[in-house]
Image (cartoon, rainbow, N blue to C red):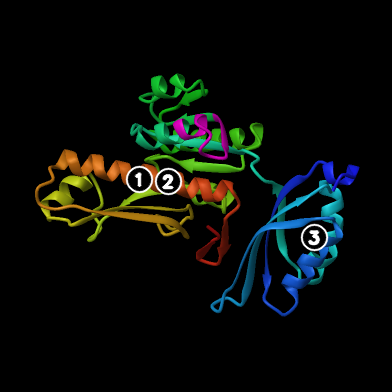
Amino acid sequence: MTSAAAHEHLNHWVLTLSCIDSPGIVHAISGAIVAARGNITESQQFASLDTGRFFMRVQIESPAKRDELEAELRPVTERWSMAWDLDEVGRPLRTLVLASTAGHCVNDLLFRQRAGQLQIEIPLVLSNHGTLRDLVDFYGVPFEASAVTSPESKAAFEARVLEAVDTHAIELIVLARYMQILSPELCEALAGRCINIHHSFLPGFKGANPYRQAHGRGVKLIGATAHFVTSDLDEGPIIEQNVVRVDHSRSVSELVAIGQDEESRTLSQAVKWFAERRVLLDGARTIIFR
């Protein structure tokens, strides 16, 4: 083609949606995209037999602006009472990181952001300790530390979290080994956009020095789980899990290093999928469009 239309700028969009499953949804969505002069470049869908809901993620290239594409989609989304979102492909997600004293997950997130491996923008790191200030400063990201030692200081810290979410237009909150339990009120305020990471052992070891406990019991698998935060501690919908095999020859310090590597890569993968709009909630579990 040599016409001016062939050289028209194409916008790249990602559409995610969910609704009660019924016939005709894919056809209707595709028709709306075509009506907006769009071309589907990636499409994934899933119908849940457990909840009866339909989930879909579509990437679109089109000369249409957002309002034109939304105008074509709206009659379809209204007809099926869809929960839906339309965004630009590749737009960095505004992300707030919460940390304590362990630096491996924070370092991994900041490095991957700088290297362009994560579709996020971190305007601030909040911590209940000052330990990681130099690390965060190295990446040129603002860092704030406030001790959490009482109910009053915990309430003040959580108020600062909500203030930062509002001030910085935060879309994702990541608990990068933040070692404080969030209040039910904060969990509710951040529902569906707050991701946590923790080690996964079998059997589960709680309390101090879990890796020493694992070593003492001869654990053969070390893993990590990234999940959404809910008021039920460490029981939110799971986004990603990884595991690595170990044996009796590993020292406690080696188990710690192995575990931290698993935590870092598992959390980064969960953040990557979330930022790319590949994670949809289906009740107590997630749908991941890889």
Q: Judge from the rendering whether residue 227 lies leftward or rightward of residue 274; answer left or right.
A: left
Residue type at numbered disc 2: Leu
Q: Is residue 172 magenta?
A: no
Residue occupied by mark 2:
267
Residue 105's tag is none
| Residue 165 in sight here | yes
Q: Is residue 140 above or below residue 191?
A: above
Give the percent coordinates (x, y) of residue 37.
84, 55
Kind of element beneath mark 3? helix
Residue 263's tag is 1
Crowd class of label 3 (few under 14; some 14 to 19; many from 20; radius 10 Å): many
Provide the residue span drawn in magenta. Answer: 111-123
Residue occupied by mark 3:
33
Residue type at numbered disc 1: Glu
Give the percent coordinates (x, y) of residue 104.
35, 35
Tell me which numbered mark, 2 or 3, is placed earlier along the sequence: 3
Q: Judge from the rendering whether residue 78 lies leftward or rightward of residue 127; answer left or right.
A: right
